Amino acid sequence: MSESTLDYLLDLDGQIIAVNENYFVKFKAGRVEPTKWKPHGISYSLTLHDRYNKRVMGFDNAHAVDPPRKGYSCRKVVEYDHKHRHHLDKGVPYEFTDPGQLVADFWTAVDEYLEKKS
């Protein structure tokens, strides 16, 4: 993991940015002790909210999510890095590679979400 992309993500912590008159994004990011659930040593939440402060989409690693079911496998893998594609989505796994890619993927998802809404 590049220190510069990690610094970039950590510098976003606490930022709230208006995207347009109806939506804004919030960034939370901090270092944590690495664990098997957060091996990269980062706790993060990058979220898109509507004008009523309702989270409508986001990426985080605050809780575990079940992997998508394929076939009849009974093996349960706990995933912490995940994304919520809409306000009712409980989360689907997200493959964290590095902080810079996380931010890029988040902004791409924001653009896609807003495009569907326009």
Image (spheres, grey):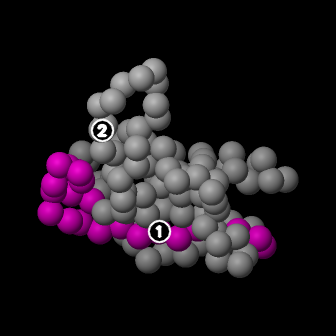
Residue at image coords 36%, 25%: 73
Q: Position of residue 14 (x, y in %)?
A: 44, 77
Residue at image coords 43%, 64%: 45
Q: Residues within 10 Å of mark 2 (few under 14, many from 20)?
A: few
Q: Which residue has dot 1 on it?
A: 27
Picture disc at residue 77:
2
Residue at image coords 36%, 62%: 62
In-image side of 115 versus 89 (left or right): right
Q: Position of residue 56 (x, y in %)?
A: 64, 62
Quarter the N terminus occupies: top left
In-image side of 15 versus 114 (left or right): left
Q: Between disc 1 and disc 2, whose residue precedes? A: 1
Picture disc at residue 35:
none
**Which marked residue is nearer to the observer: mark 1 or mark 2?**
2
From where the camera sits, is residue 68 visible?
yes
Please tell me whether residue 105 is drawn above or below residue 72 in the rendered image: below
State the extent of the magenta-drawn residues as a range.
21-42
In the structure shown, which secondary structural element does the residue marked by tag 2 occupy? loop
From where the camera sits, is residue 3 visible?
no
Residue at image coords 55%, 75%: 16
Q: Nearer the viewer, residue 42 or 61?
A: 61
Contact flag, marks 1 and 2 (Cβ < 8 Å):
no
Please tell me whether residue 73 is drawn above or below residue 11 in the rendered image: above
Type of amino acid under label 2 = Val
Type of amino acid under label 1 = Phe
- The CA span between labels 1 and 2 is 27 Å
